[in-house]
Image (cartoon, rainbow, N blue to C red):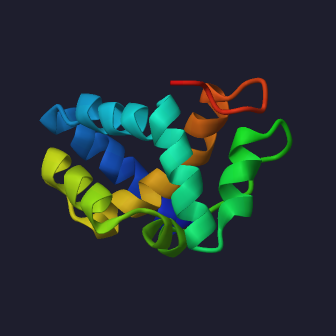
Amino acid sequence: MAGLFDGLVNKLTELADSTGLTDQVHQHLADLTSANGISTLLAQAEQAGLGDKVRSWIGTGENLPVSPDQLRSILSNQQVQALVDKTGLPAATILPALAQFLPAAVDHQTPGGTPPTA
């Protein structure tokens, strides 16, 4: 299964690179990991019963992994649709990659273990 997932991520990266979508994906990650984005993400995760996942990304300890299904339950339909619209890729392709990269992106934006202020 790991090989299949790695292949999917590689294909997504190749597709993003070949179509110029890398910047759009990075911009969406930047939006999700802005001060307001992290606060919103944490609130949405709390509502979904997955606040421990996002708090681990913000904290200074190990980042808990998140599955694409868990991420789908955290993100709103509008957030997922915005990413689909920006990239032209289906959610089934985007969510696994986002699940892999979002914890590290949030962690990077919160080096002191607290969300950035707006």
Quarter of the image where the N terminus is located: bottom right
Vertical relation: 109 (above or below) 77: above
Estimate the x, y position of residue 52 in percent, counting from the top left: 74, 61
Front-most of 32 and 68?
32
Q: Residue at x 28, y 33 (%)?
A: 22
Q: Residue at x 45, y 52 (%)?
A: 98
Estimate the x, y position of residue 95 in percent, counting from the top left: 40, 61
Q: How many marks?
A: 0
Q: Residue at x 31, y 56 (%)?
A: 79
Front-most of 41 and 99?
41
Q: Say whether residue 13 is left or right of residue 118.
A: left
**Residue 7 visible from this viewpoint:** no
Q: Say whether residue 21 is left or right of residue 118.
A: left
Q: Say whether residue 51 is left or right of residue 81.
A: right
**Residue 28 visible from this viewpoint:** yes
Q: Residue at x 49, y 66 (%)?
A: 74
Front-most of 18 and 58?
58
**Quadrant hosting residue 81:** bottom left
